Image: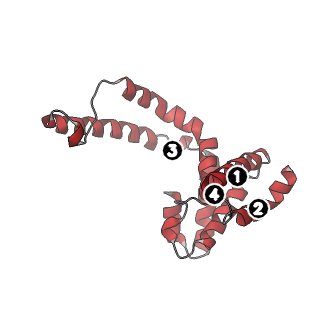
Amino acid sequence: MRNYLRDNALNLCQLLEPLVCVKAKEDVATALVHVMEAENAAIPFLVSLILSDIQRIVDNDHLLLRGNSIATKAIEAYMRLVGENYLQEILSQSIQALIASSEDLEVDPLRIANVTSLPAHREALKHWASRIWEKILNSSHKFPVELQDIFYLLRKHMSNQDKSELTDNLIS
């Protein structure tokens, strides 16, 4: 079964795409990602699947990896699979500190009893957002190589097709 999936995963996805509901797409995508990762074939599979999705959605570039396609669900599943440890390592300490903090970060004026505290809340929120963003920026050397490879290959394929402007939308 694994050999069949490894060899026919893209065709299977193309066949199922118009037929199954979003939840089934997510289940199929997640299962395929795990099988392909075990077979050391996740990166080429995902690149092919995303490129296939790009060709399918030619008229709606803004929907690329934004919708409920199998490609979208597959890249989300893969990012969870290979990116979870990275996110834990980089963000867990700051998130725990934020949770433990007694600072009020509410910035919705309708949810604040004393509206005069709104500027202080905004500053506190900016502080925490900057602190967390700084952690992310300083961790680029720890960003999963697998995701770097996928994004590099997508950029390369899109540049070869004179669609390099789409690459930034895909990767963002």
Residue 148, position in %: x, y?
60, 52
In the rendered view, tell whether residue 167 sits above or below residue 100: below
Q: Is residue 119 left or right of residue 136?
A: left
In the rendered view, tell whether residue 47 sits above or below residue 79: below
Looking at the image, tell me whether mark 1 or mark 3 is earlier in sequence order.
Answer: 1
Q: Amino acid at mark 2?
A: Leu
Residue under pointer 2: 12
Q: Amino acid at mark 3?
A: Ser
- Tag 1 and tag 2, C-beta contact below 8 Å: yes
Residue under pointer 4: 21
Residue under pointer 1: 28
State which mark lies toward you, 4 or 2: 4
Q: Amino acid at mark 4?
A: Cys
- How dense is the environment of label 4, judged by Cα within 10 Å: few (below 14), some, or many (20 and up)? few
Looking at the image, tell me whether mark 3 or mark 2 is earlier in sequence order.
Answer: 2
State which mark lies toward you, 4 or 1: 4
Q: CA distance from mark 3 to mark 2?
A: 35 Å
Q: Amino acid at mark 1?
A: Val
Circle 1: element type? helix
Residue 7, position in %: x, y?
83, 59
Q: Is residue 141 left or right of residue 26?
A: left
State which mark lies toward you, 4 or 3: 4
Query: In front here: 88 or 68?
Result: 68
Residue under pointer 3: 140
**Which residue is found at the position 34% from the left and 40% from the top?**
130
Q: Is residue 149 visible?
A: no
Q: CA distance from mark 4 to mark 2?
A: 15 Å
